[in-house]
Amino acid sequence: MAHRCFVLSLGVNWANDGHRFSANMTVPLAPKVKLQLSGQAFLQEYKNTHTVFDIKREDDIYRGSIGITWEFYRNTDLVLQFNTTSADSNIAIYDYDRNVYSAGIEYRF
C-alpha cells in the first residue's frame, strides 16, 4: 500500500511532503496462534532550508514489527510484539533507532 502524505505544520523547518509505503501480513501458525508481520517506509522531503543547519532536510523512516497472537480463551488473546524504528536523516540530530518490546491482553466483545 502506498500513500502520498502532506503535513501542514507550523514553522518553516517542519513543512514537508512525504511518501509512505506499507505492507502487513497475518499468518495462521496453529488453530489459535497467528504470526503478524508489518513494515513501513516513510520518505520525507522538507520544503525549506533549515534555519539552523542551512540545508534542506530529508528523512527516511523505516518501521517493522513482528508479533504473535494466541487466543487462550474465547475472544481473549495474549499478544507479544517487537517493534523497531530507524530514522535516517541528512541532519544527524534527527537520526535515531528505537526498539520496543510489548506484551498485552486483548479482549473482543
Image (spheres, rainbow, N blue to C red):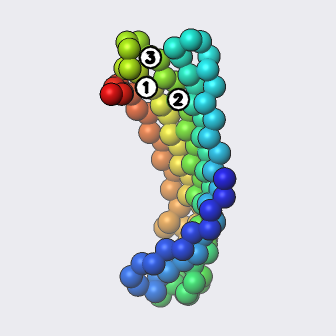
- Within 10 Å of disc 1 (Cα), the crowding (few <14, some 14-19, many 20+) is some
For disc 1, the marked residue is: 79
Q: Which residue is mark 2?
A: 67
- Residue 43, horizontal then vertical, whole percent: 63, 65
Residue 34 shows in the view: yes
Q: Is residue 76 above or below residue 26?
A: above
Does 41 sit left or right of 73 as displayed?
right
User: Can you tell which quarter of the image residue 16 is in?
Assistant: bottom right
Q: Give the spatial CA distance, label 2 vs label 3.
A: 13 Å
Left or right relative to 83: residue 23: right
Mark 3: give few (<14), some (14-19) or many (20+) Cα within 10 Å: some
Residues at marks 1 and 2 touching, judged by CB atoms closer than 8 Å: yes
**SS type, badge 2:** strand
Marking on residue 44: none
Q: Of the residues shown, which amino acid type is indicated by label 1?
A: Val
For label 3, the residue is 71
User: Marks 1 and 3: which is nearer the front?
Assistant: 3
Query: What amino acid does circle 2 point to?
Result: Gly
Report how far apart the C-alphas of labels 1 and 3 lie in the structure.
Answer: 9 Å
Please tell me whether residue 16 is drawn above or below residue 80 in the rendered image: below
Residue 65 or residue 99, whichever sits in front: 65
Q: Secondary structure at mark 3?
A: strand
Upstream in the sequence, badge 1 or badge 2? 2
